Image (cartoon, rainbow, N blue to C red):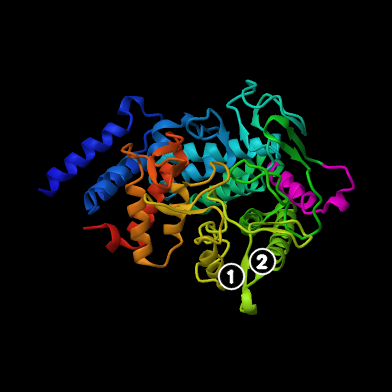
Amino acid sequence: MQTLLFLCLVTAALAARPPPSQRKFNSTAVEAYLAQIVPKLKDPDIARIFTACMPNTLDTTVQKASANDSFIITGDIDAMWLRDSTNQVLPYLRFLNEDPALRDMIRGVVLRQLRSVALDPYANSFNIGPNGNGHQDDKRVPPMTPAVFEGKYEVDSLAAALRLMFLYWNITQDASIFDDTSFYSAVYTILEVVEVQMLSTKEQNGTYPYQFSRPEEGDQYPRAPADHTNMVRSAFRPSDDQTTYDFLVPSSAMMAKELERLAIMTATIPGPRPAAITNKAKLLGAVIRGAVEANGTVELAGGTGRRYVFEVDGFKNNNDMDDANVPSLLAMPYYGYCDVNSPNYVATRATILSSQNPWYFEGTAAKGIGSPHTGSNNIWPMAIIIQGLTSTSDAEILQCLEYLKTTTAGTDFMHESFNKDDASQFTRSWFAWANTLFGEFIMTLADTRPHLIFQ
């Protein structure tokens, strides 16, 4: 009976996946893992959705794959985001030492990202070549180039490139990536951008290294003054929406963590050049972390502690909310900035998963965090997944799983967002990051809480 059920699940999931001949990339290790795990899952809906979602990045978005250059689109947009492409491949990193072809492909993503950063550190997404696709009419400093799809400066994009590079190296110990000319070029560039964007408006004295204008959407940067906080300014959020205040706390937190990791990695490389990077990365990471704790937090009522806020300007103004996109305040333990039991995080979590967060919605279909990017009353599966990944409660995790499996609108895929009362009203039918993030959620539960999902 169990074998018959498994065959039915596989048949249904294969209907959602492209046929093998049309898949963009095949990983023997990923397919073996699916064959091993899926029969153990006790919820047939979760099993079916997992089978469709977990390999979705490999199935549909790999447009170029080699050890020196891989290009991965975000899904329904034919461009490669630094942030998205990092997160799209994260669930597959555990297989790098089992699957040489997968290892080569992700090595190629690392190098493509480094070259992209060296080309334009203030861009968030890139074309496969200098084809001029995307937002070429945007007015910006530095100017748009044909290889750049969109030129929005988001500090988390740089942190994402550092994150993938570190995790790839940490798993494979492949030091050959340091020999690529883009390695030093990209790392020096990131450190330079971080230092410059830690300056206040007054300190920049009108000579802004990054400027942006897209009048039809009301985007204009710089837009308002910002004081010195020792955090890193970010013109745009991970949603690609403009920030309200320049210092986006979760993005600065993520950059602090990735600079700390960069220092760990470069400390293994002999020579004065990497030693200088190690020292600078360690210093900047410590300074930014201290600033997040001091200037990215507010005092709790009654003076009982502190919690994080979303954005600040250094003049004691803050934007007290959270956004579904990652990095977010909710995701701070997910990207390694803090522990799930950190007092500041626990207090923050209680606030943003409540009506105190203007972008938290409760409906008949689900409860969860949304985003100004998709408007009121739309919940993001990504935020529900992150809620589950950062939860210490079995009951909360099971509720997250229930919301996720009942809001795919019959597609077996995650969407960007869905209406809190009607999941058939959704945005983006092909959003590979959300799909593989769901895969990562189930894989993490299989490792840490198997009693919740296995028979």
Q: Quadrant of residue 15?
A: top left
The amino acid type of the residue labelled 2 equals: Thr
Q: Secondary structure at mark 1?
A: helix
The answer to if 319 sits in the magenta stretch is: no
Task: Check the picture and name the quadrant holding the C terminus.
Answer: bottom left
Q: Residues within 10 Å of mark 1 (few under 14, many from 20)?
A: many
Q: Position of residue 289 (x, y in %)?
A: 67, 63
Locate residue 170, reporting x and y percent. 52, 54
Does any portion of residue 97 appear in the rendered image?
Answer: no
Count of all numbered marks drawn on residues in the image:
2
Asked which secondary structure carries label 2, the reply is strand
**Is 200 included in the stretch rendered in magenta?**
yes
**395 relative to 236, above or below:** below
Pick the front one: 406 or 246 = 406
In this rendering, the answer to whether 167 lies above or below 285 is: above
Q: Is residue 391 left or right of residue 126?
A: left
Nearer the N terminus, badge 2 or badge 1?
2
- What's the CA distance linking mark 2 and mark 1? 8 Å
| For residue 73, above or below residue 318 | above
Amino acid type, residue under disc 1 in the picture: Asn
* CB contact under 8 Å: marks 2 and 1: yes
Residue under label 1, please give it.
344
Q: Which residues are magenta?
A: 186-208
- Residue position marked by numbered label 2 in the rendering: 297
